[in-house]
Image: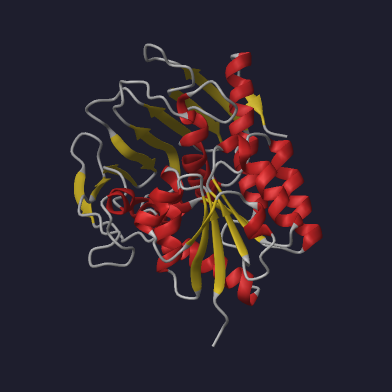
Amino acid sequence: MAETLNVALVGYGYAGKTFHAPLIAAVPGMALAAIVSSGKDKVVADWPQVAVHAGVDTVLADPAIGLIVIATPNDTHFDLARRALEAGKHVVVDKPFTVTVAEARELDAIAQKARRVLSVFHNRRWDADFLTLKALIDTGKLGDVVQFESHFDRFRPQVRSRWREADVPGAGLWYDLGPHIVDQTLQLFGKPDAVYADFAKRRNGAQATDYFHVLLRYPATRVILHGSVLVPGGGPRFAVHGTLASYIKHGLDVQEDQLKAGRQPGCDGWGVDHQHGIRYVGDADVPGVEPVATLPGDYRHYYAGVRDAVTAGAANPVPAAEAILVMEIIELAIRAAEARRELALP
């Protein structure tokens, strides 16, 4: 029987508490052995059997810890990941990978030199709606995709006092949600030719970007990535148009809400989205309408992949090179918005 991979989670804010801790604990062959947090009481209330440390040095020095998961504010990712790799640990970093492309490349170089697994938590590759859309594209049921719209809209009109909405590096909606939908786009279409972007702070008192509209140009496809916190009615999550059919899907993947409600990953109904999409076929004026059952999603597949990469030399589920390309587009979009023109990828 394979040895259990002991994991230390660094950070117990929203990402650590909601996503990483329950997912790690739910994957066979992994053990949530330690959590690094200044809020010991909060951790103990949720995980009384897990060791809690106030600082990262203890877990970096512990030979029993094989994997460090970093779920701290974005501008701390680079330094913590560097220290963990240099301590000989395998590392998972929550998205965004880092706040600059240069930092991301440096971490990749350190990991390669240390021969350690370095992976980035792009969990939304395992969203139910994305898996369904990918299957439709892969099987040719939409034909050649000519227009792809990915929306991540919410209604949060009040600016909250938290680092994600502060005027600090790596904050704002583009760094928060952009990595998710950029990564999904790259999984579907690969590297674009050019990027155009528009960013704004639309709420009263906003200190960080709370609106983005980004166009990725491919030779035969146009990709629109859009996010806003001022969309009370919501819109489609995906609107995809191909030479044979269109696919429209409303609603977000349910796993985040399930985790927030305290449901255990893998429980009955886990990742099951009952809000199906629609495939429109034929004439634009009188299209055929076909409901598309949504495949179940499961974020556990990410951590199962990390486990296998560390313990058995399997493929990294999200290697650093793929996360670096995400950061290149995140950064290039910011420059394109500042220049108010389209910029080509190198």
Residue at image point 61% right, 15% down? 338
Instruction: Confirm whether residue 173 shows in the render.
Output: no
Instruction: Give the camera-side residue of 230 and 94.
Output: 94
Q: Quadrant of the C terminus?
A: top right
**Outermost residue toward the right in this view:** 113
Q: Position of residue 177 (x, y in %)?
A: 45, 36
In the displayed structure, 214 sits above or below 15; it is above
In the displayed structure, 343 sits above or below 328; it is above
Q: Quadrant of the N terminus?
A: bottom right
Which image quadrant for residue 6? Answer: bottom right
Q: Position of residue 231 (x, y in %)?
A: 29, 25
Instruction: Confirm whether residue 308 shows in the render.
Output: yes
Left or right, residue 56 beside residue 128: right
Residue at image point 69% right, 43% down? 79
Which image quadrant for residue 44? Answer: bottom left
- How many tags in the picture? 0
Instruction: Give the camera-side residue of 141 and 12.
Output: 12
Left or right, residue 230 beside residue 175: left
Instruction: Give the camera-side residue of 164 and 152.
Output: 164
**Outermost residue toward the bottom in this view:** 1
Left or right, residue 298 beside residue 273: right
Instruction: Give the camera-side residue of 215 and 87.
Output: 87
Residue at image point 35% right, 59% down? 297
Q: Position of residue 30 (x, y in %)?
A: 50, 71
